[in-house]
């Protein structure tokens, strides 16, 4: 899963998933900024990385991640075309063995999890000691995130989403046992449609809509 698709339900057909996938093609500067932000905190030495909620593979594939977990068959089919090995499953019950990965990635998927606490507990189980979890969110505390939150009730897609701040997300991660936090952010404007130049990636969080948090399993 990833961000900003506003159909009336999560893509279930190839046609819907393809429409979702085209969002990234239609917003190349936004997509590029998100990739840069994730890449800034993704461990370069990871050899057994997995994206949880891999969607159509728009993040895993260019970031060199070859395995994804995705519940939607239509999305998984497109991800497979990008070269991913996709395992059908949910974040709250990962179909992976204990300590199977040295890095896990979740890109704007947490707001759609039915139980974020359980998903983070599962991430802890699946990571090897010393492994890293990288979580990208739409930060509710950012100016554009506040607009998303205010309009959520009238959005057929985001009505069920639970937008969190970076602090709230970090607190849930700490509750699951994670430590050694770092963060970065991008997309600082008031309207994604107005992005016309390369967006910077800055340390910290709270101002950019797209926030990335890295946390480690001790």
Image (cartoon, helix red, strand yellow):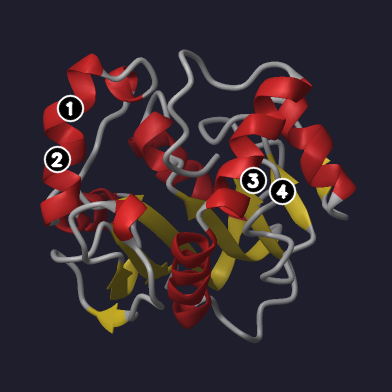
Q: Categorize mark 4 by other alpha carbons within 10 Å: few (<14), some (14-19), many (20+).
A: many
Q: Earlier in the sequence, mark 3 or mark 2?
A: 3
Tell me, yes or no, whether the two marked residues, 1 and 2, touch with CB atoms within 8 Å: yes
Residue drawn where x is 34% and y is 66% of the image = 213
Q: Earlier in the sequence, mark 3 or mark 1?
A: 3
Tell me, yes or no, whether the two marked residues, 3 and 4, touch with CB atoms within 8 Å: yes
Tell me, yes or no, whether the two marked residues, 3 and 2, touch with CB atoms within 8 Å: no
Secondary element type, mark 3: loop
**Dot label at residue 114:** none
Occupied quadrant, residue 142: bottom left
**Dot label at residue 151:** 1
* Marks 3/2: CA–CA distance: 26 Å
Q: Which of 51/79 is in front?
A: 79
Tell me, yes or no, whether the two marked residues, 4 and 1, touch with CB atoms within 8 Å: no
> For the N terminus, which image quadrant?
top right
Q: Earlier in the sequence, mark 4 or mark 1?
A: 4
* Marks 4/1: CA–CA distance: 31 Å
Residue that label 4 marks: 68
Q: Nearer the viewer, mark 3 or mark 2?
A: 2
**Is residue 174 shown above or below 46?**
above
Residue that label 3 marks: 54
Residue that label 2 marks: 147
Q: Which of 130/1 is in front?
A: 1
Secondary element type, mark 4: strand
Secondary element type, mark 1: helix
Residue drawn where x is 68% and y is 59% of the image = 60
């Amino acid at each position: 899963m990833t961000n900003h698709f506003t159909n009336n339900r999560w893509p279930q057909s190839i046609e819907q998933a393809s429409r979702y996938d085209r969002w990234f093609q239609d917003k190349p500067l936004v997509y590029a900024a998100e990739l840069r932000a994730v890449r800034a905190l993704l461990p370069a030495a990871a050899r057994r990385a997995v994206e949880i909620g891999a969607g159509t593979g728009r993040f895993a594939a260019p970031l060199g991640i070859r395995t994804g977990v995705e519940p939607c068959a239509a999305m998984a089919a497109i991800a497979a075309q990008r070269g991913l090995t996709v395992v059908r499953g949910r974040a709250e019950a990962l179909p992976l063995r204990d300590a199977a990965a040295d890095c896990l990635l979740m890109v704007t998927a947490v707001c759609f999890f039915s139980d974020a606490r359980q998903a983070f507990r599962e991430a802890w189980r699946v990571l090897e000691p010393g492994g890293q979890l990288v979580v990208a969110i739409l930060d509710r505390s950012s100016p554009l995130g506040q607009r998303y939150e205010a309009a959520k009730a009238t959005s057929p897609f985001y009505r069920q989403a639970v937008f969190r701040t970076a602090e709230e997300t970090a607190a849930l991660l700490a509750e699951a046992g994670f430590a050694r936090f770092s963060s970065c952010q991008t997309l600082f404007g008031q309207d994604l449609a107005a992005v016309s130049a390369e967006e910077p990636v800055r340390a910290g969080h709270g101002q950019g809509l797209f926030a990335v948090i890295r946390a480690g399993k001790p």
